[in-house]
Amino acid sequence: MKRPFVIALAAMTADGKISSRAANPLLSGLSASKPRIQEAMGGADAVVSGCATVAGDMSLWHEANGLREARMARGLPPAPLRVIVSNDGRLGPAWKASCCTAPPPVIFSTARMPERLRSDAASCAELFLFQGKKVDLARALLILRADFGVRRLVCEGGGALLRALAEEDLVDEIRLAIAPVIVGGRLAPSLTGLPGGFLQPQREFRIARHSVVGGECCLELRRTKSCAI
């Protein structure tokens, strides 16, 4: 069975932090991120994020940078399919904003999702619930490919979701912007979320492209042995 090609979009400081001191994600704030966002979103069939990272500013990027027109010129829908992953099903208030998009979003959660939220989510989204404590991400990707025709999937975070995808060896490419600043922060999240155990084995990538934009470094990293089909 086939799964989508997964591209992770990320931005971090020189000491590896993906959030500012005010706990704001860096992705849409760096000038080097903007062309990377536009390029990746322009060819994406779907965009996946954790429920805490469902950010309205990404929809603003679609409009501000002409992504809608660029996508339609390539024969793609005006906006990519929105995919939300939540292990505990506590989606928070931001998720409903994605229900204004067409097509309706896809939500992957577990049987831990509160009953009061299930009917609400199912009424305006495609809802898939897995048994156990965590979403089966490998199976979720197969569903996206088979049921929704997703071939290119962009992950916009957060770090916990990126780590979960990396643990299953489901990340094929990373488009990374690095800001020349250090912020510290013992509990500030990195690309793979809050500090945790090492990946076993480690995931190796190669540098496919690199450039400097507005004083910030841009890297395109490709998995040395991609498992995408």
Image (cartoon, grey):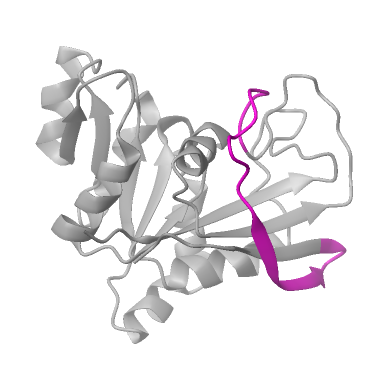
Tally of numbered tags: 0
Residue depicted at x 30% and y 58%: 3
User: Left of 38 or right of it: where is 126?
Assistant: left
- 102 lies above or below 156: below
Residue depicted at x 39% and y 48%: 48
The N terminus sits in image quarter: bottom left
Magenta includes 210? yes
Q: Residue furthest bottom?
A: 73
For the magenta stretch, what is the residue range?
A: 192-216
- 118 lies above or below 112: below
Judging depth in this view, the residue of 119 and 11 nearest the camera is 11
Q: Main secondary structure of the magenta part?
A: loop
Q: Quadrant of residue 199?
A: top right
User: Left of 185 or right of it: where is 142?
Assistant: left
The C terminus sits in image quarter: bottom left
Judging depth in this view, the residue of 117 and 5 nearest the camera is 5
Residue 146, x across and y down, in percent: 17, 59
User: Left of 8 or right of it: where is 176?
Assistant: right
Q: Quadrant of residue 80?
A: bottom left
Residue depicted at x 42% and y 80%: 70
